[in-house]
Image (cartoon, coloured by chain):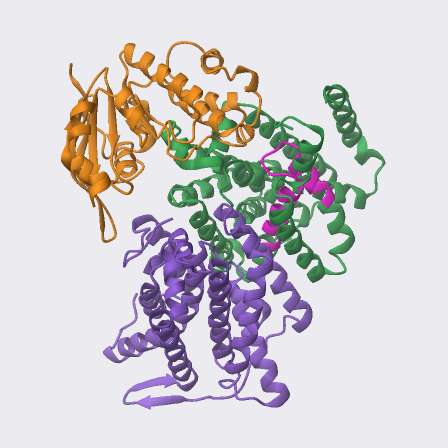
Amino acid sequence: MAAILQVRNLVKRFGGVTAINGVSLSLEAGKIYGLIGPNGSGKTTLFNCITGIERRDSGAVGFKGRRIDRLKPHQIFHRGLGRTFQIIRVFPELTALENLLVVTTSEFKPARERAEELLRFVKLETLADEYAGNLSYGQQKLLEFIRVLMSDPDLILLDEPAAGVNRTLLNELLDAVKALRDRGKTIFLVEHDMKVVMGLCETVFVLDHGEKLAEGPPGVIQADERVIEAYFGR
Amino acid sequence: MKRWARWFPAALALLLLVLSVYPLWATGYGVRVMLQLFMWIALAQSWNLISGLTGYVSFGHVAFFGMGAYTTAILVVKGVAWPLAAVAGGVMAVVLAFVIGWPCLRLKGPYFAIAMLGLNEVLRVMASYFEGLTGGGLGLSLPTLDASVRIYYAMGLVALAVTAATYVIVTSRFGLRLMTIREDEVAAEAMGIDTFRYKIYAFLLSAAAPGIVGGLAARDMGYIEPISVFPLVTTITMIVMVLFGGKGTIWGPVLGAVILFTFQELVWANFPHAHQILLGGIIVAVVLVMPRGILGVLQQRYNLPRTV
Amino acid sequence: MTPHITPVMLGQVIVSGLLAGALYAMVALGLGLIFGVMRVLNVAHGPLLMLGAYITYFLFITVGLNPYLSLLVSMPIVFVIGVALQHFLVRRVVDAPELSSLLLTFGISIALVNVAQLAFTSDLRSVEFITGAFLVGPFAFSKARVIACLFAAAITALAFLFLQKTRLGKAIRAVSQSREVAQVCGIDVHRIHMLAFGMASALAAAGGSLMTVMIAIQPEMGAVYTFKSFLVIVLGGAGNYPGALLGGLLLGLVEQLASLFLTTQVNEAVAYVLLVLVLLLRPTGLLGGRST
């Protein structure tokens, strides 16, 4: 399977702080990947650099074989890369349906049909005309999740999808993620909930202080001494 | 409340009918008052298009009004018919919007606002500077013409057109995308919306009507000078009208324009400074207490749709 | 078509620029404090400067108070006004989108300016206190400007000492960097906000007071200084307090140099063009600071 995302020696500094210090990783299409690490290790920054929200200082990011590190976020989006955010970023003064309709879809069905289908998928169809700002935390989380799916991206970055979500909802989300993987999508998620990561991901990357500490299947990572030290030791 | 929604279009049609025959029985003064009201509606609606929808506060919007005024005045003095000159005023205003918007809309919201703060002053200074063209500080006099009634209709048409355009935009996906810029620009970018392009479109659209209306006002006043067509208080009034009425809505700016214009006619003439203090106070009050404006309050109370 | 520029002219212009720049720096530091600590763009900064000017003016014509001594009066008074503004109004929009605070301070500035118009009328007023110039070799420097620069430099230095050495000053810097972390460290953020706003207002008032001796004052005088302060902050980098210093000096220099080649009217546009250029090319400021 070809690599769908390649990050090579990515460096990102904020003033005097080096948030990402030469991180390299490679994702193959059709798998679920996890990114873990202690707080402040640079996970969200890495996501921001990949999606163009932050400008990297050096290094390269390749998506589907082409460089994307100099593109603007909306251009990267159109190449087939979607993401959700750590802090929910739905559009509060738009209705749930409108939140989906604004996403630029190119092909297949008219946007409205697809939006309604996605709402049904996560059982939010009754709230289609409700202001997104009035939805509960979990509902907004789901909304943000399906919003990403509106354009049918090939690579989906999920930033802490399990945060603040109850078990039932979480299981639905995880089932949805697995279903996406089965359809050939690639998912890359940042998560603190170890059960989620270990149960879902095929390969896990560990970030610590802006550097890639380890990489491998969940079982191996769990047993890796350096990882344990990073989380608990220091 | 779907009941009232049914008679609203009928009421609107009736109102438009009344307004279109108004000049037949009104006094000259009455016509001029209404003409100014139309002007303010057009200005407020235009400001709403950029600032109410995208959240990018344009503090220098009167620049487009002044641009239109000067373009029209210069052309009329050279013998061009005023309707054509007014349209040219609109075109030049859009050109100005492009020249300014191209660099400035790349800036994030607050920085854009600051850049627009200075725009007003710069244009006023430049109008004084290019004396050969603009008559400098002495201003420009247009050949006398009593066209109040015709200008009444012209202004009314522009006000109607901008309101109609706002309706089309707010109920379309284009409008939704503009609003995402206001809601969360980063998320909008991440969802594939080229925020810069949308901002430019909104900005250009928002400059057209002020340009035309500025031209019409110049024709109506018969004389313009830098301070009269680039006054800060015009921008302030535009802002208050939209904030007070309800930014981002279709009828909010109209409501705000009507209420504040009435108030202005009663208070401004005698107490210009007290009036402005009040305007400042209204802005403070709206931001703190009523951020969605009057229409926003009504929307919540009576469960009105967003596109009202 | 450029006039023949002698080294003397150049030297004169450079020093004038630095003199003016010190004043800009002091006033801009105020604006920068508010932005750094609260992320609020205070459009009312200019009107606060104007208030300081009027206080000095009236103290001069009623009791004949030395304008420079009146700093001891105008600064505390406007400090209190600033604290009140923050406590009653600005506090409510500190967490709102930045546009809310921008509109709020805009509304406040309109109200302030027009209250001044009502109270003082828009007649130009000035204080005749020090005239003439210091003659140093071939150079002539207006006495009023030199003294203003000295005061501005002294006040700015005091402000920096305060920020660097005192506990409160360090708290201000801490809140500028991260409000959450400062709260966790037990800093009363609201008090720091009030202090910062008050300090900023006092700095603006100082600028106004010093200017009374140099230029004619009127209620709308503040607006251009708000704008120039923004420019200085952008030049120096948001949140970068020393940067504001250099930004101020730079602005003073550029303006004076430009006056050699351009008429005074177009000079006003220089600041504007400079602002747009810097915002486009180096939004984090020439010295690097945070960008929005």
Please name whichever residue, A228 or C79, is drawn nearer the observer in this view of the structure. A228
Q: Is residue B49 visible?
A: yes
From the viewer's perspective, is residue C73 above or below residue B253? Answer: below
Question: Magenta segment, principal secondary structure?
Answer: helix
Q: Position of residue B74 (x, y in %)?
A: 55, 48
Q: Residue furthest right?
A: B25
User: Which chain can be seen in purple?
Assistant: C
User: Which chain can be seen in orange?
Assistant: A
User: Which chain can be seen in green?
Assistant: B
Q: Position of residue C85 (x, y in %)?
A: 58, 62
Q: Is residue A56 visible?
A: no
From the viewer's perspective, is residue C254 above or below residue A34? Answer: below
Please name whichever residue, C90 or B119, is drawn nearer the observer in this view of the structure. C90
Q: Residue at x 63, y 60 (%)?
A: C111
- Tell me where the magenta segment starts and ends, as one range: B232-259
A12 lies left or right of C247: left
From the viewer's perspective, is residue C3 above or below residue C183? Answer: below
Magenta stretch containing residue B256, yes or no? yes
